[in-house]
Image (tube, grey):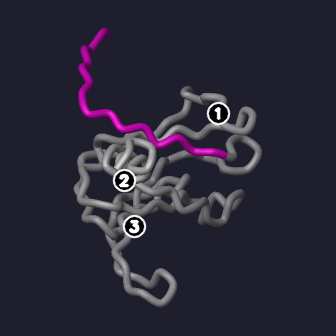
């Protein structure tokens, strides 16, 4: 098997979150990014960055606005919903199509919609190592 033919599985190993879509864009009460975990994963290794398309294969970075997931583990096959509005983390069981599913609900805490007018693309960035230092 060549590297090129194995690329989808390699990408899945590197970023085991699949972005499905944004639901109810423009409605701050319901707007949410929907993703699915393709394998067991610690979500604290991921940052979501809203962006805009820049040509057929690029994006313009809006890194002034990002969401870094807290330390939470999800299993492969479970769904992650990132609501734009304020709220508290919870897990619910519900239907996705005809199947029962587990949904991990996270809340960004923003006062207005970001998926209409501001951004039309999302970048899912995996970070496995970082350092921080209090500077003030």
Position of residue 92 in the picture relative to residue 123 (left or right) = left
Q: Position of residue 93 (x, y in %)?
A: 35, 80
In the picture shown, does residue 77 fall above or below 97?
A: above
Quick check: is 59 in the magenta stretch? no
Quarter of the image that includes the C terminus: top left
For label 1, the crowd category at 10 Å Cα-Cα, with few meaning under 14, some 14 to 19 and many 20 or more, is some
Residue under pointer 2: 9
Judging depth in this view, the residue of 117 and 2 nearest the camera is: 2
In the picture shown, does residue 91 fall above or below 63?
A: below
Position of residue 64 in the picture relative to residue 25 (left or right) = left
Span colored in magenta? 121-136
Quick check: is 132 in the magenta stretch? yes
Give the residue drawn at x 49%, y 47%.
109
Give the residue drawn at x 35%, y 61%.
37
In the picture shown, does residue 38 fall above or below 124?
A: below
Instruction: Choose top left, top right, bottom left or bottom right for residue 100.
Output: bottom left
- Front label number (2 vs 3): 2
Residue contact between numbered discs 2 and 1, judged by CB atoms under 8 Å: no
* Helix, strand or loop status at disc 1: strand
Give the residue drawn at x 23%, y 56%.
73
Residue under pointer 3: 79
- Front label number (2 vs 1): 2
Residue sitting farthest toward the front:
1
Mark 2–mark 1 distance (CA, rounded to whole Å): 23 Å
- Residue 59's disc is 1
Q: Earlier in the sequence, mark 2 or mark 3?
A: 2
For label 3, the crowd category at 10 Å Cα-Cα, with few meaning under 14, some 14 to 19 and many 20 or more, is many
Q: Position of residue 53 (x, y in %)?
A: 70, 38
- The kind of secondary structure the magenta stretch mainly shows is loop
For label 2, the crowd category at 10 Å Cα-Cα, with few meaning under 14, some 14 to 19 and many 20 or more, is few
Mark 1–mark 3 distance (CA, rounded to whole Å): 25 Å
Instruction: Choose top left, top right, bottom left or bottom right for residue 44.
Output: top left
């Amino acid at each position: 098997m060549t590297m090129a033919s194995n690329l989808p599985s390699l990408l899945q190993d590197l970023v085991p979150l699949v972005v499905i879509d944004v639901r109810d864009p423009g409605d701050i009460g319901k707007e949410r990014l929907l993703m699915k975990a393709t394998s067991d994963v610690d979500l604290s290794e991921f940052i979501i960055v809203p962006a805009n398309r820049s040509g057929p294969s690029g994006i313009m970075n809006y890194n002034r606005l990002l969401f870094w997931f807290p330390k939470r583990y999800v299993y492969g096959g479970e769904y992650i919903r990132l609501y734009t509005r304020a709220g508290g983390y919870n897990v619910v069981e519900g239907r996705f199509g005809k199947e029962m599913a587990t949904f991990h609900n996270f809340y960004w805490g923003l006062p207005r919609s970001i998926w209409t007018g501001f951004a039309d693309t999302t970048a899912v960035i995996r970070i496995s190592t970082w350092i921080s230092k209090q500077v003030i």
